[in-house]
Image (cartoon, helix red, strand yellow):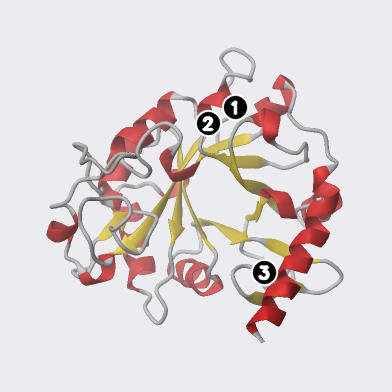
C-alpha cells in the first residue's frame, strides 16, 4: 500500500516536472525588478538559518521578504526554528514542544562542523524587532496537530509590534491557515504546496487534499515546489487572482523561466545583484 501511494506521488511529480525541464533558465534584470525576492529561512545561504544575524544579512542583501519558521515551546513562547527539534541546528537535543524558552535558548546554534557559535534560536518577537518593517516578514507555521496555540500566539505577537501590514503567514496546513484567518482576517495568507494534480480538483501538500478556488478564497499566494509547476498552471492561477511563488532556489541561472510573482531562495544576494541598480521591490 505504501509503495503504491509512493509510486502515485512520484508519477504525478514526474508528470509535472517534464515540461518544467524544457523551460529556459534565468530572468532578465527587468523581469527580476518585478519579482518578490524572499530569503528562505532568513537567507540560509548567507548564515546560520533562521538566526538574527542571517536575517540581518538577508535584509542587507536586498531581500524584499525574509521567511522564517516557527514552533511553540512548552511554556507557550513562539521561537524561530525550521525543525520541530533543536537537534540538527544547536548543540542541544529535544523537541521544542517539550522544552521551555529558557531551555531552548540555553543552547547555541552550531556551524557546519558542529561547533557552537554565539547564535541562539530567537523568539518571533526578537525577529520582528530585528526586521522592524525594513522588509516584509513571511512566517511559516509548522502546524502542531490538535493544537492551535501557535496560531493565536503568532497573531498576538504580530499585533504587539503593530506589524500586520508587513507580515504574511504561510503553511502547508489548511487548518493553520484557517485558524489564523479566523483570528484576524486582515493578515495576508499564503498556501504552501508541492504540486497541483492535473485534471483533478486536488493538490499534494504532504498529503492529498481537495482544491477549489472557493476553499482558498482568502489565500493570496500559492507557493509551489519549483519543479512541479507549469506556465499554463500559473496563468490559470493568475486568472483567478492568485499570486504564485516558487521554492526553494539558489541563483537565477538555475531557475526555470516562469511567469511567477516571487521566488523563495537561500541566496537573495544572487537575485538582488541582477536587478537594476537601486531597484528594490516594495510590498
Which residue is the site of mark 1? 271
x 21%, y 51%: residue: 91
Residue 15 place in picture, x, y as percent: 82, 61
In this orientation, which residue lies closer to the viewer: 250 or 6? 6
- At label 3, counting other C-alpha atoms closer than 10 Å, the crowd grade (few under 14, some 14-19, many 20 or more) is some
x 37%, y 36%: residue: 55
Left or right? Give the position of 203 relative to 154. Answer: right
The label number, if any, that marks residue 268 in the structure image: 2
Q: Is residue 144 visible?
A: yes
Residue 273 place in picture, x, y as percent: 57, 19
Q: CA distance from mark 1 to mark 2?
A: 5 Å
Badge 3 or badge 2: first in the primary sequence: 3
The label number, if any, that marks residue 248 in the structure image: none
Q: Are marks 3 and 2 in contact (CB under 8 Å)?
A: no
Residue 228 place in picture, x, y as percent: 73, 55
In this orientation, which residue lies closer to the viewer: 170 or 119? 119
> Judging from the image, what secondary structure is the residue with disc 2 in?
helix
Q: Quadrant of the C terminus?
A: top right
Left or right? Give the position of 65 relative to 132. Answer: right
In this orientation, which residue lies closer to the viewer: 38 or 281? 38
Which residue is the site of mark 3? 204
x 21%, y 37%: residue: 117
Left or right? Give the position of 263 relative to 63. Answer: right
Amino acid at each position: 500500500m505504501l509503495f503504491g501511494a509512493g509510486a502515485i506521488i512520484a508519477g504525478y511529480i514526474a508528470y509535472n516536472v517534464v515540461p518544467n525541464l524544457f523551460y529556459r533558465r534565468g530572468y532578465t534584470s527587468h523581469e527580476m525588478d518585478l519579482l518578490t525576492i524572499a530569503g528562505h529561512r532568513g537567507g540560509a545561504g548567507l548564515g546560520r538559518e533562521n538566526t538574527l544575524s542571517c536575517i540581518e544579512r538577508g535584509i542587507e542583501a536586498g531581500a524584499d521578504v525574509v521567511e522564517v519558521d516557527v514552533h511553540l515551546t512548552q511554556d507557550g513562547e513562539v521561537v524561530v526554528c525550521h525543525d520541530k527539534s533543536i537537534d540538527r541546528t544547536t548543540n542541544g537535543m529535544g523537541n521544542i514542544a517539550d522544552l521551555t524558552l529558557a531551555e531552548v535558548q540555553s543552547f547555541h546554534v552550531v556551524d557546519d562542523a558542529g561547533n557552537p557559535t554565539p547564535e541562539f534560536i530567537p523568539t518571533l518577537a526578537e525577529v520582528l524587532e530585528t526586521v522592524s518593517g525594513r522588509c516584509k516578514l513571511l512566517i511559516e507555521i509548522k502546524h502542531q496537530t490538535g493544537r492551535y496555540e501557535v496560531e493565536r500566539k503568532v497573531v498576538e505577537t504580530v499585533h504587539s509590534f503593530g506589524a500586520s501590514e508587513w507580515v504574511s503567514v504561510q503553511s502547508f496546513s489548511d487548518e493553520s491557515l484557517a485558524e489564523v484567518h479566523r483570528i484576524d482576517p486582515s493578515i495576508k495568507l499564503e498556501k504552501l504546496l508541492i504540486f497541483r494534480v492535473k485534471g483533478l480538483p486536488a493538490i499534494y501538500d504532504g498529503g492529498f487534499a481537495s482544491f477549489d478556488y472557493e476553499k482558498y478564497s482568502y489565500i493570496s499566494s500559492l507557493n509551489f515546489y519549483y519543479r512541479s509547476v507549469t506556465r499554463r498552471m500559473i496563468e490559470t492561477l493568475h486568472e483567478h487572482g492568485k499570486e504564485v511563488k516558487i521554492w526553494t532556489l539558489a541563483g537565477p541561472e538555475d531557475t526555470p523561466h516562469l511567469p511567477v510573482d516571487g521566488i523563495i531562495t537561500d541566496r537573495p544576494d544572487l537575485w538582488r545583484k541582477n536587478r537594476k541598480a537601486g531597484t528594490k521591490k516594495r510590498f
